């Protein structure tokens, strides 16, 4: 999964790639632009026949690609490829052993705040902030 940069097909978009034993790399070049500094749900799926990229729970692009993923022990790349630089944040990265459906991806995206909500009260960062406020000697 790579953030596209200036000079690529869709600056401010994403590309999802897999390498298979039938013809090398498959690329799903996203068409939708992603706004900087806006939380965006991005997902890529591969079912052995189609390589698909989803933005905010909706299919952006799907391309034909067949074969088994080649070299599954190789590193997973997120953000940028090679010497490129990704500037931004990523949170809650999931890997599944199957391609999720568009409905499943949309459900995950919509229930994200409920499913992964974190109560900050009592956590280290919150306690440390309280201690710093109470005693200025830190």
Image (spheres, rainbow, N blue to C red):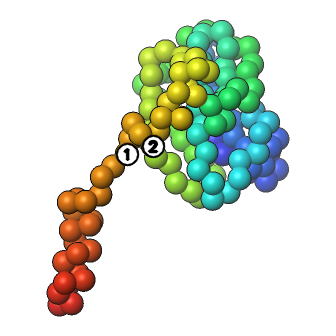
Q: Quadrant of the N terminus?
A: top right
Question: Can residue 50 be seen here?
Answer: yes
In the image, is 89 to the left or to the right of 131?
right
In the image, is 79 to the left or to the right of 50?
left
Residue closest to the eye, 67 or 55: 55
* Residue located at (27% from left, 65% from top): 125
Query: How far apart in space, not on screen, are marks 2 and 1 (Cα)?
Result: 5 Å
Q: Which residue is mark 2?
A: 113
> Judging from the image, what secondary structure is the residue with disc 2 in?
helix
* Residue located at (82% from left, 50% from top): 7
Is residue 27 positioned above or below 132 on the image?
above
Question: Can residue 1 be seen here?
Answer: no
Q: Are marks 2 and 1 in contact (CB under 8 Å)?
A: yes
* Residue located at (19% from left, 77% from top): 131
Residue closest to the eye, 84 or 87: 87
Q: Quadrant of the C terminus?
A: bottom left
Q: Position of residue 20 (x, y in %)?
A: 60, 16
Q: How many numbered callouts?
A: 2
Q: Position of residue 75 (x, y in %)?
A: 46, 34
Picture quarter containing residue 42?
top right
> Judging from the image, what secondary structure is the residue with disc 1 in?
loop
In the image, is 121 to the left or to the right of 52?
left
Picture quarter containing residue 50?
top right
Q: Which residue is mark 1?
A: 117
């Amino acid at each position: 999964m790579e953030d596209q940069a200036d000079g690529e097909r869709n600056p401010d978009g994403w590309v999802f790639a897999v390498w298979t034993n039938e013809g090398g790399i498959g690329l799903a070049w996203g068409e939708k632009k992603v706004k900087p500094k806006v939380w965006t749900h991005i997902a890529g799926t591969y079912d052995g026949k189609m390589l698909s990229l989803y933005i905010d729970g909706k299919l952006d692009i799907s391309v034909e690609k067949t074969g088994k993923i080649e070299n599954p022990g190789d590193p997973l790349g997120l953000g940028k490829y090679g010497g490129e630089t990704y500037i931004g944040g990523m949170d809650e990265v999931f890997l599944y052993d199957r391609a999720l459906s568009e409905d499943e991806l949309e459900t995950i995206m919509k229930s994200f705040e409920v499913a992964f909500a974190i109560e900050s009260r009592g956590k280290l960062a919150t306690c440390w902030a309280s201690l710093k406020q109470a005693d200025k000697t830190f």
